[in-house]
Image (spheres, rainbow, N blue to C red):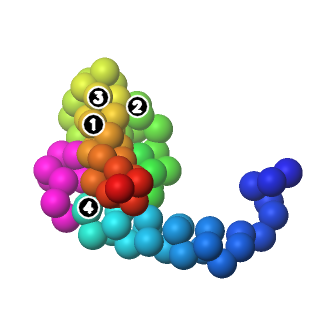
Amino acid sequence: DPASLPAGPEEVVYRNDLLACIEGTLPHLSPDRREALVLRFWGGLSIRAVAAAMGRSEGATKMLVWRAVAELRRRCLDDQDG
């Protein structure tokens, strides 16, 4: 399984840069997007649990998480491509 192989130095640098970008971008997300993202991925909650915690519908929560991920992707991955 390629995912279980140790990362080479370039991959480690890439991952570290990406993580630093994500950590630097989080404070710039809207409070709702940041909360949804943190609960979903760092907290490991399901969309249903995030929705309940935030007092939102599941559909609205899915969209909130999707938009937060899209913003991180735009700010971090697009920056690394160019």
Image position of 11 (left or right of 26): right
Cα distance in 3D space between marks 1 and 4: 13 Å
Amino acid beneath label 2: Arg
Residues packed near mark 3 inside 10 Å, few (<14), some (14 to 19) or many (20 plus): few
Cα distance in 3D space between marks 2 and 3: 13 Å
Q: Secondary structure at mark 2?
A: helix
Asked if the magenta segment contains residue 31, the reply would be yes
Q: Secondary structure at mark 3?
A: helix
* Cβ–Cβ under 8 Å for marks 2 and 1: no
Q: Which residues are magenta?
A: 27-35
In this view, the mark in front (2 or 3): 3
Cα distance in 3D space between marks 3 and 1: 6 Å
The quadrant in which residue 3 appears is bottom right
The quadrant in which residue 76 appears is bottom left
- Closer-to-camera residue (70/57): 70
In this view, the mark in front (2 or 1): 1
Q: Which mark is residue 48?
A: 2
- Return the residue at label 3: 63
Give the residue at x 46% y 45%.
45
Looking at the image, can residue 36 be seen?
no
Which is more N-terminal, label 3 or label 4?
Answer: 4
Image position of 9 (left or right of 67): right
The image shows residue 48 at horizontal and vertical percentages of: 40, 31
- Return the residue at label 1: 67
* Cβ–Cβ under 8 Å for marks 3 and 1: yes
